Image (tube, rainbow, N blue to C red):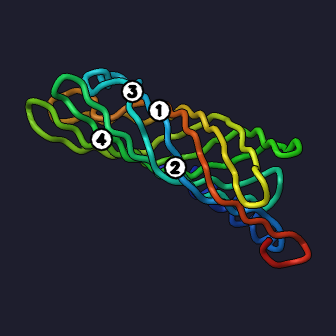
Amino acid sequence: MIKRSFVAFLFIFGLIIFSSVSNADEGDFSFGAALGGVGLTGTDMNQYGSNGFGYGGYITYAPSSLLGMDVNVLYSPHSNQGSDANTLYGTVALKTGLYYDILYPFFTTGVGVYRNSIQLAGGSYSVATFGFNFGGGVDIDLGKNVRIGLLVRYHPVFDRAISNGSNGIGDLWDALLRIGVLFSTSTQGGWD
């Protein structure tokens, strides 16, 4: 399973690099903060608490108005009656959509690396694995250099057991509000 995830990651990365090289004089680049709800939905995850508040950052590069690459890193603490789980994950995804004036509704799909640090009555555990993500959202350009957006995704993660036999990590979802800075280039050259 891990080999398939790695191959999928390389495919997506190669596609983005190819796209960015073919249109090197155009594109949007944005980065900023992301925060919102993160829910643990996998098997045995309810012992760590189901929902938490996640926060982190993102970088997006879109060589054209139809295709972009979105990189997110998020941290989300969860707790439930003495049990704690701190989830840290990074994702790389393709993002595709169409602009409607200042609105950019999009779909996204990609791969990720997911890590859970767990505190249970029986001890501490740390689990890391690969997974996928898919979802959608909308970005809104406010003026020339400010972008806000909403991103909602589901993450099917390859389950990993810890030594007590329960799953240490499983599927999750996130609904994130994002705000960032936007830079654009065009065929005339130069950053706006």
Which amino acid, by three-letter code, is at mark 3?
Answer: Asn
Give the residue at mark 4: 86
146, above or below 79, in the image: below
Query: Mark on residue 51?
Result: 3
Inspect the image, locate mark 1, and give the three-letter code of the amino acid beneath it: Gly
Mark positioned earlier in the residue sequence (2 or 3): 3
Residue 78: image location, x then y, percent: 31, 33
Q: Residue at x 91, y 76 (%)?
A: 188
Q: Which residue is mark 1?
A: 37
Alpha carbon distance from label 1 to label 2 = 16 Å
Q: Secondary structure at mark 2?
A: strand
40 vs 111, left or right, is left
* Amino acid at dot 2: Thr
Tags 4 and 2 touching, CB below 8 Å: no
Do we see residue 84 in this rendering? yes
Image x and y of residue 88, in percent = 37, 47
Which of 181/84 is in front?
Answer: 181
- Cβ–Cβ below 8 Å for labels 1 and 2? no
The Cα–Cα distance between marks 3 and 4, rounded to whole angstroms, is 12 Å
Could you tell me if the residues under marks 3 and 4 are in contact, i.e. CB atoms within 8 Å? no
Q: Residue 47 lies in what quarter of the image?
A: top left
Q: CA distance from mark 1 to mark 3?
A: 7 Å
In this view, the mark in front (1 or 2): 1
Circles 1 and 3 in contact, beta carbons < 8 Å: yes
Do the residues under discs 4 and 1 have CB atoms within 8 angstroms? Answer: no
Where is residue 41, by image quadrant?
Answer: top left
Distance of mark 2 from mark 3, alpha carbons? 19 Å
Q: Earlier in the sequence, mark 3 or mark 4?
A: 3
